[in-house]
Amino acid sequence: MSILEMKGISKSFPGVKALQGIELEVRKGEVHGLLGANGAGKSTLMKVLSGVIQPDEGEISFKNEKVKFSSPLDAQQKGIVIIHQELSLVPMLSVAENIFLGRLFGSKYNVNWKEVHEKAKYYLKQVGTDINPSTIVRDLSVAQMQQVEIAKALSFNADLIIMDEPSAVLSGAELNQLFETIETLTEKGVTVIYISHRLEEIDRICDRLTIMRDGKVVETRIVKETSREEIIKGIVGRDMDEEYPTMEVIEHGEEILSVQNLSLKGKLRNVSFQLKKGEILGIAGLVGAGRTEIARCIFGADKFDKGEIVYKGNKIKVSNPRKAIELGIALVPEDRKEHGLITKFSLNRNFTMAALKKINRFGFLHRFKENEASKSLIQTLKIKTPSIHQLALNLSGGNQQKVVVAKYLFSDADILILDEPTRGVDVGARREIYTVIQDLVKNGKSVLLISSDWPELIALSDRIVVLHEGRIKGELAGSEASPEKILQQALV
Amino acid sequence: METVETVAEKRNETFLQRVRTKVDLGDVGPILGLIILIIIGSFLSPVFLTKGNLFNILTQISVLGLGAIGMTYVVIGRFFDLSVAGMLSLAAVLIVGLQPYVGTIGAIFAVILVALAVGLLNGTILQFIKGDFGASIMITFGTGTILASLALLYTGGFTLKPELDPVFSWFGNGSLFSIPAPIILLIFFSIILHVVLKYTTFGRAIYLTGANHEAARLSGIPIHRIRTITFMIVAVLVSIGGLINSSQTLNASPVAGVGFELDVIAAVAIGGTSLQGGAGNITRTLIGVLIIGVLNNVFVLIGLSNYDQMMAKGLIIIAALLLDRRNESNLIRKG
């Protein structure tokens, strides 16, 4: 018997069709896995289902009734609760206060704490835990916090609980705890939609699964009758198309960077790889696999526990980004608006900020040099702007990204670490960024490319190392790599 | 080849739009306010626009001005320094207290060394705890309280009588080219700070730091060092203010600086330097200082009580911050 049916759900955002004609049917009491690559539309669909956004088309029936959710509260009251990856508990309040946040009860002026605690205890028991309701949430483990979230969901009399990558923040033992909780829930007739990238989890607890890709549902299947290969194929699906340029073959020079046994507690374990002059090395892995951590360690933005970095034949110690930039290592960070640029400053100020030394004349700013350099960077990278005095915030995403790259061209970087350079960038600007990357290596620079867009990574990289939970799982030559192969290594 | 300029010309901006982007309210507002105050002052009292009275105003604001131009550096870097009050008191008594032992000039050098150490301490603690804007308020509040108490401990709570040698007297009551020395000192340091801020790479680094700490750090700007230096600069300027204060009043009070930090920050904010960091300049701060000076003078001329003056000052600070907020949102709307 189905508890939820979504029919023909579509949702567009300016320039993007996020969901197209989604059909999803979830049965009462089952654990329904939802899979798909980053950007496949899982989150959007769940936002529609939990009332965060409204679909443009399509209808939802829940418990055999046609429903429309005007807000998350509305969805909650009707029995659908979503538990986000970033938990939404208030750390300074007690467990009971969190469960009944905004809904504490009692007489007009006083909260009836005794009853609040008793009720909290009741719901916690339903989840199968004996956490004391007066514990301050801050003192709980992440797994316990999740249990509190679920107890909170139950207190809304939820019939359907959506869990958005709940396992991403859990370790082995905690994971078992979560699975037990889910089993307790389904025994009580609660239905769960379980979003995860980890196939072994889907195998273990899901009854059926739905695979999404490019805003559409690919298929819904029974887990027991589906092989991993089939799942992977479903997730990756698309062929590589002309979105990507054919890379010119560039002769690689000598080794410029060698990372040896890089370790960071809880994040990275014995990561080793080499990078040659003129090479593009791709780093693949799922969110949380440790890709950004590697970048930040090499760049000196974060400290690491163990390991060595050999650069141009010398062992180096990068204690801070300043040192890295001086040596010729640059990081184009994932969050370009907060970390890459100063958006309220003009372009020329942004261009020169990583190499003030170069516009320094006896301590004074060499403004002429700054302006000339800015103009030439704008031309080299074909940045679309009316003037070098334009504020960075007035540029499009793609052009902003170019400004960040330009900043490190000006600082004479030899290695550029690009962390998700095309995230949030439209297709046309993507092509231009690819050209920029290609020009970089043509001019003898080396690139470490981090991207969640695997076809992109494959098209651009000479080699790809695949990370899984902080370890390098394998290495693929760009020519032999395929999304399937990456996924196989990234998942296991 | 399409040059950058030709593209700019192609943009169809109306004259008004161009004026609006060039001139923002943050610059004009305070100047306008100052002019209005001066007009009001000249109507209220015939002596207002006399040379004597104007020098009087400037002399009175010189200590505040020195603190405020130093604080401008700190605020542009998106930090706060509340220890200036304690620093002023300590400098005021230390100079007079050390006079008998090392002479006036020796005492001045000693106090400047102390000020550098205080700035270094503030900066180092913040670096150690990886402190941000909020932490800088609390830490400097703490160090400032310690400095204030040191000043009191040093004198046992009494005021000290200075030895009136020519050097000491010059700072408060002397003159150069018939301009009172405190004004000369304020102008001198203002020019230096203005030039450094506007034309040097160090000045640029302060702006970059204040605009976005993390982006600046990731671009290799030594934000900790920049912050420490700005703390050292403000401490030194304030200690010179303490010297002027002791020389002007002919006694060294261990409570000379009480409330000083708020006046300083008020002057910076009234001038239109954004407390959000990354924007502002010395000229603005000087206008803020002048507004406070003229306002105090007008209050006295129309016979307002001290308590009324406090009320008026509070209202003006709030008005200045409202103006600041409006500018911020204007910037965002432009984008």
Image (cartoon, rainbow, N blue to C red):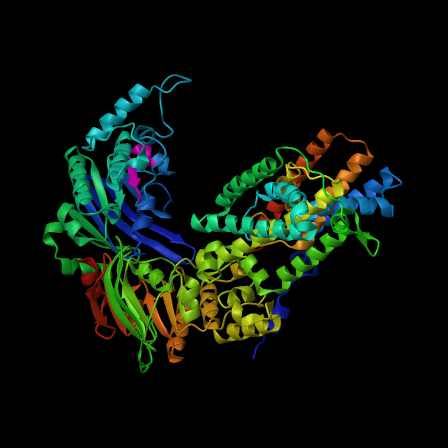
The reply, left or right, for residue A190 in relation to residue A10 is left
Residue displayed at 43% across by 47% down: B129
Image quarter of the C terminus of chain B: bottom right
Q: Position of residue B34 (x, y in %)?
A: 75, 46
Question: How many numbered circles are shown?
Answer: 0
- Residue A388 visible? The answer is yes
**Magenta residues?**
A75-84
Between residue A146 and residue A482, name the one nearer to us. A146
Which residue sits furthest front?
Answer: B101
As drawn, B175 above or below A239? above
Q: Position of residue A31 (x, y in %)?
A: 18, 43
Measured along the vertical axis of the image, is residue B254 above or below residue A329?
above
Q: Quadrant of residue A290?
A: bottom left
**Which residue is pictured at 46% across the width and 68% down the height?**
A402
Q: For the N terminus of chain B, which image quadrant?
A: bottom right
Query: Relative to the observer, which residue lies in front, B38 or A4?
Result: B38
Residue B76 visible: no
Residue B145 locus on image (x, y percent): 55, 38
Q: Is residue A222 left or right of residue A345?
A: left
| Front residue (pair B257, A312) | B257
Q: Position of residue A49 (x, y in %)?
A: 31, 43
Please name the residue shown 15% across and 52% down the image.
Answer: A200
- State yes or no: residue A281 in magenta: no
**On the picture, is B270 further left or further right than A201?**
right
